[in-house]
Image (tube, helix red, strand yellow):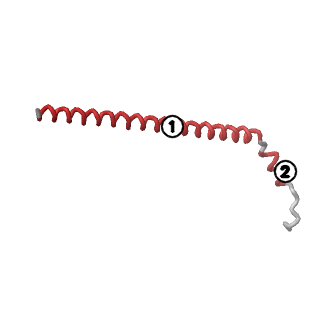
Amino acid sequence: MLQLIFTIVILFSILGILIWAYTENRELGKTHTRNISALENEIAINYGQVNFRKQHLEKYQFMQYNLQEVLVPQPKIKL
């Protein structure tokens, strides 16, 4: 009789540990999925910003604007 009670206690303990491990694993999976989704969203936003800046840099005419800045008279400089 004692052996039967001991076996039942062991079985319920193992079952409890398995249920606990399953729920913990499931929660970790949900947390991981949320983190990955947030990171992918941030990457998409950053990618959009990089493309936006790249497009505007390609439109900017460095030689034209820099020459205009250089050719501004500077009366303070005495040669």
x, y (%) of residue 38? 55, 39
Where the N terminus falls, by quadrant? top left
Q: The disc labelled 1 sits on which kind of residue?
A: Arg
x, y (%) of residue 39? 54, 39
Q: CA distance from mark 1 to mark 2?
A: 51 Å
Q: What residue is shown with label 1?
A: 34
In this orientation, does residue 65 appear? yes
Label whose residue precedes the other's in the sequence (1 or 2): 1
Q: Is residue 34 left or right of residue 70?
A: left
Nearer to us in this view, 48 or 59: 48
Q: What residue is shown with label 2?
A: 68
Residue situated furthest front in the rendering: 1
Q: Is residue 22 left or right of residue 62?
A: left
Q: The disc labelled 2 sits on which kind of residue?
A: Gln
Give the residue at x 46% y 38%.
31
Image mark count:
2
Give the residue at x 88% y 65%.
75
x, y (%) of residue 17? 29, 36
Is mark 1 in CB contact (under 8 Å) with mark 2?
no
Nearer the viewer's eye, disc 1 or disc 2? 1
Nearer to us in this view, 44 or 7: 7
In this orientation, does residue 79 appear? no
Question: Which secondary structure, mark 1?
Answer: helix
Nearer to us in this view, 51 or 57: 51
Which image quarter: residue 57? top right
Q: Residues within 10 Å of mark 1 (few under 14, many from 20)?
A: few
